[in-house]
Amino acid sequence: MKVEQQLLEEFKRANFLLVKEHQAMNDWDYLTLGQHYGLPTRLLDWSNNALTALWFATEQYKMERSRQPYATIWILMATEAHYLNMKENHNPFTVNKTRLFRPRIIKQRINNQSGVFTVQSTESIKKRLSLHQEEDFASRLLKIMIPGKCQESVRDELHTLGVNAFSVFPELEGLCSLLQWKFFH
């Protein structure tokens, strides 16, 4: 996908000083950073922490409540065979099967979110396949829907358990979101 590679190259070129502090070493690191800051990539965010996943689902619901009557959590029941062997896969654009990818912890939020990604193969991108259409993953996905009327109490419980904007985004952005929630909730 030429456009995808050009986009990544421009991201690396135009933002070196912004990225330098994260010590990105390869295209996997750059894609990880870009994904976390909204760059379109072939990566899909997941969390190994169920409470973090619940926080993201309810946060997404809060932003889109007019379109969806419920929040959605997808659980992927993966095995070790579903993970990418990073010793063999040095180029994210030549991955021949969609796989899970454990990023280097180059940003604290990756650690706090227990972050992991699926990386789509170029063939899957060309065919516009969703993960539930991928042969290796279709039978391993579980969809949980949380009704809209439960959202506020779920968010309150998550806050009690220490899962909030600041624990998920341990930067000024997260702190300000948490303070808004505390004082205007």
Image: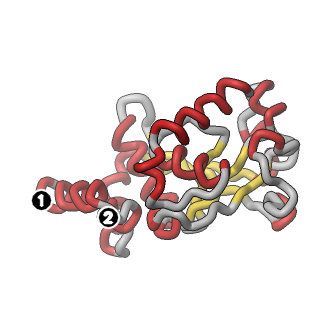
Name the kind of residue labelled 1 in the image: Phe
* Residue 166, disc: 2
Tell which of 10 and 175 is nearer to you: 10
Q: Position of residue 99 (x, y in %)?
A: 78, 51
In this view, the residue in front, 26 or 57, is 26
Task: Name the residue located 75 percent from the left edge and 45 percent from the top edge.
Answer: 92
Q: Picture coordinates of residue 169 (x, y %)?
A: 38, 60
Residue located at (34% from left, 43% from top):
62
* Image quarter (top left, top right, bottom left or bottom right) of the N terminus: top right
Tag of residue 183: 1
In the rendering, at what x and y percent does residue 120 appear?
A: 75, 41
- Residue 50 shows in the view: no
Q: Does 104 sit left or right of 172 as displayed?
A: right
The numbered mark at residue 28 is: none
Can residue 162 be seen here? The reply is: yes
* Crowd tier of the residue under label 1, counting other residues whose Cα lies within 10 Å: few below 14, some 14–19, many 20 or above: few
Residue at x 35% of width, y 65% of height: 170
